[in-house]
Amino acid sequence: MAAFNLSPSAPSTFILAGISGLEAAHVWISIPFSVFYIICLLGNCMVLFVVGKEQTLHKPMYLLLCMLALTDIATSTSVVPKALCIFWSNLRGITVGGCLTQMFFLHAVSVMQSAILVTMAFDRYIAICKPLRYATILTNARIANLGLLGLIRTVLFVLPLPLLLSRQPFCANHIIPHTYCEHMAVAKMSCGDITVNRTYGLVVTFVVLGLDLWLVVFSYSLITRAILRISSKKAHRKALNTCTAHICVMLMSCTFFLFSTVTHRFGQGIAPHVHIILANLHFLVPPMLNPIIYGVKTKELRDKMGKYTCRR
């Protein structure tokens, strides 16, 4: 990514301003950032460790959970270390290649995570609507293939974002009012026409992620219809419990994503530091809470994690 063909007028480095308007509070803001990041790493690494060690958890559902944990780690790691460098040491500089690379990974992880959440919804649909065929329809190999397909889709859709920006001429002002290289924040510093960049960003947001959201909603409409047909209250409750964790994760991810996207693109009257804080929370809070939600709501995983925690 560092070898992009940058235009001659492009600066060699960008400056990340941090949280504009709250510079004096950067050190204090770094405390919750650090705590959230540590909890995120511990929780997701614990999930990866337990699923890897326990043969009984080598199932499609837990393989998907490991994929989600990896994307959670990648999401927060793409943002937090550089943000802490800004908060603690005032190290605001980032090379253009580094900025575009960070942008690629941030958006790639978001699109990949969206694909994983869709696959998890499909997994719950098969488990509830076609339980007798679950083992034959969803094998570990098939889940791995779906993961690879999601990765290919991610690269194909996200790679044009930094490639298009690398061809733009940038103005003398190369200060990015953010803690990381957000696509539109970088695009707005260009002296050229960014209509294509803006349009393609919206296409990725509303077509790719919008399609994924529609597939999740469609899957749960079928699941809901199947659950309503169950006469036994016990079976009814069990079916609902199998979906609770995924629904909580979906609602949390969508809420933070929509708040961040809407305020950034359409909230001109909102203070800049509110934009930046919401955007950072989108990359911090869901990755921190996802392993906690699945650890609490999934009995088999909760029991295994409890066994290793008590042993330690």
Image (spheres, rainbow, N blue to C red):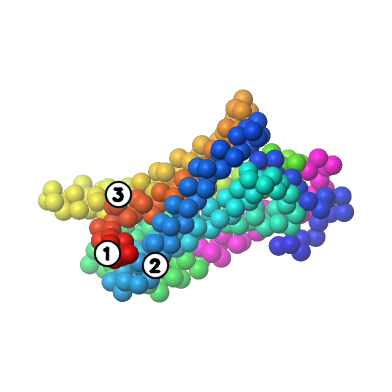
Q: Residue at x 32, y 55 (%)?
A: 295
Q: Report the predominant secondary structure element of the magenta stretch.
A: helix
- Kindly indicate the quadrant of the structure image that contains residue 60: bottom left
Amino acid type at image mark 3: Thr
Q: Disc number at residue 244?
A: 3
Frontmost residue, 114 versus 24: 24
Residue appearing at x 53%, y 54% in the figure = 75
Q: Which residue is mark 2?
A: 49
Label 1, secondary structure: give it: helix
Label 1, on which residue? 307
> For the residue carrying disc 2, how many other residues have a C-alpha within 10 Å: few (<14), some (14-19), or many (20+)?
some
Residue sitting at 44 percent across and 52 percent down? Answer: 39
Q: Is residue 25 above or below residue 209?
A: above
Asked if residue 165 lies left or right of residue 72, the reply is right
Q: CA distance from mark 2 to mark 1?
A: 12 Å
Is 166 included in the stretch rendered in magenta? yes
Q: Which residues are magenta?
A: 150-174
* Residue 310: image location, x then y, percent: 28, 62
Marker disc for residue 246: none
* Residue 116 in picture, x, y percent from top left: 45, 58
Q: How far apart, in angstroms, are the residues tagged by discs 2 and 3?
A: 23 Å
- Foreground pick, 309 / 98: 309
Mark 2: secondary structure: helix
Compared to residue 146, the image places residue 197 above or below, namely above
Q: Nearer the viewer, mark 3 or mark 1?
A: 1
